[in-house]
Amino acid sequence: MTYLRRKEFLPFSRPMIGQEEIEELVDSINSGWITTGPKSARFEEELQRYNGIPHCLAMNSATTAQEITLQALELKQGDEVITTPMTWASTLNTIILQGGVPVLVDIDHKTMNIDVTKIETAITSRTVGIIPIHLTGLPAQMTAIWEIAEKHGLWVIEDAAQAMGAHYMDKKIGSNHRSVMTVFSFHANKNLTTGEGGCIAVHEEKYVNQIKRLRFHGIEKDAWKRFAKDGSPHTEVVEPGRKANFMDIQAAIGLHQINRLDAFNERRGVLFKRYLEGLKDIDGLLLPWEGDSVHRHCYHLFVLRIRPEIIGRDRDAFVQALKDENIGTGIHYRPVHIHAFYRDYYAQNPNALPSDGLPECEWSGERLMSLPLWPGLLEDDQDQVMTAIRQVAKQA
Ligand SMILES: *Cc1c(COP(=O)(O)O)cnc(C)c1O
């Protein structure tokens, strides 16, 4: 039985690509220059201006950006990096691919970000850094993280894939130099999208040229300068790098997205608060924390956790019941350590897990789901989502 009889499926996220993006894209295509070039350079300047960070280096994804940060920081075989498994798999995959060991710390029940009271016990003589995630767009407790890192001589890389436009203590995420680098994503679901894409925000000059090389074959110069009229035709590979450069056809979209990002985030905030208000009296739902003046959300995801013992069905059944109503949801995330590869990996590396396990990650991982949230979501559609949730919760 369904309640709403929605004719169209409502996805949990949709990119907001407008006429300006389309015209800029056509302009790029007509110009004959579609890969890395002047628009990519302009987009990087806009990222720097928006975020208040001296260098933002764009590339093909946040995942590759994460690999490059670890390469630039010379992560070595066996080096340990502290993070949480309540994230996208790339946070851990990139550490493993670089030869490191992701050492896992549980999350905080309220925020679902890293539990800062549990970081210090995870530090060993092999620990080199900490990667906190600003999950759902809610900043992690950075002051505590920086203090621990500084006390133990560790670097901090922020996984801000979901957090462009969020603020920590009145400053944009990534703009505090106490984190050596910050990674943002422009994947299609993110608050600012270029289809695919990402960037590394960095404060220290010394990393800039190396990151530019590592995103393009390890070549010393930007290719577009090489082929431009006044460039040198010679190339020089100084270390093996990746093919991870950012394209002007991506920048064409990004240049207009960034102008609209504050308005997007504001609208997301309105919808986020409507969900909080509209769902607050339903038993068995644990609604997300909306942040405070220190942790200012950018409302990337609205993740609620259901209590099956009250609701009468588990999360997957709940998700399916909403799907039957033509309402899409997401799961952010199934904890990384329970994926097939990582089950084996941690069975072989038990010291990389806390001795008391990851109960909060597992508790939340089984109960969480993301509701439809994007700036163009209509109030009527959102009301239908809330009606469906109310009905599904009541019926069970
Ligand atoms: C999206 C996301 C990534 C990966 O970003 P890509 O640009 O798709 O590579 C990494 N970490 C988190 C927390 C994310 O949400």
Image (cartoon, rainbow, N blue to C red):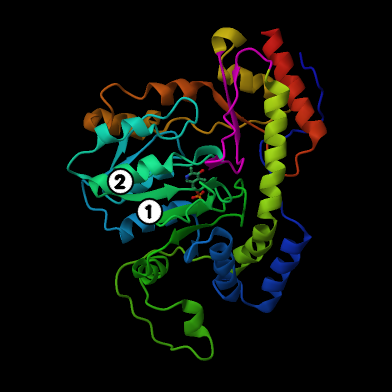
Residue 288 visible to an observer of this rendering? yes
Cβ at disc 2 under 8 Å from ligand 1: no
Q: Main secondary structure of the magenta part?
A: loop
Q: Nearer the viewer, residue 261 or 144?
A: 144
Residue at the limit of the structure toward the bottom, as seen here = 230
* Distance from Cα at disc 2 to Cα at disc 1: 9 Å
Residue type pointed to by label 2? Ala
Badge count: 2
Q: Quadrant of residue 393?
A: top right
Q: Tell me the residue that label 2 is attached to.
A: 149
Residue 325 visible to an observer of this rendering? no
Quarter that holds the C terminus: top right
Cβ at disc 1 under 8 Å from ligand 1: no
Residue type pointed to by label 1? Arg
Q: Cβ–Cβ below 8 Å for labels 2 and 1?
A: yes
Q: Nearer the viewer, residue 24 or 281?
A: 281
Residue in view at x 50 percent, y 53 percent: 184
Tell me which label, 2 or 1, sits earlier in the chain: 2
Residue in view at x 55 percent, y 72 percent: 41
Q: Secondary structure at mark 1?
A: loop
State the image coordinates of residue 395 (x, y, percent, origin top left).
71, 8
Disc number for residue 312: none
Q: Tell me the residue that label 1 is attached to.
A: 178
**Residue 324, above or below 242:** above
Residue in view at x 25 percent, y 32 percent: 121
Q: Which residues are magenta?
A: 281-307
In the displayed structure, does residue 173 sit left or right of residue 119? right
Q: Quadrant of residue 93?
A: top left
In the displayed structure, does residue 38 sit left or right of residue 322? left
Mark 2 closeness class: few <14, some 14–19, many ≥20 residues within 10 Å: many
State the image coordinates of residue 371 (x, y, percent, origin top left).
65, 31
Q: Secondary structure at mark 2?
A: helix
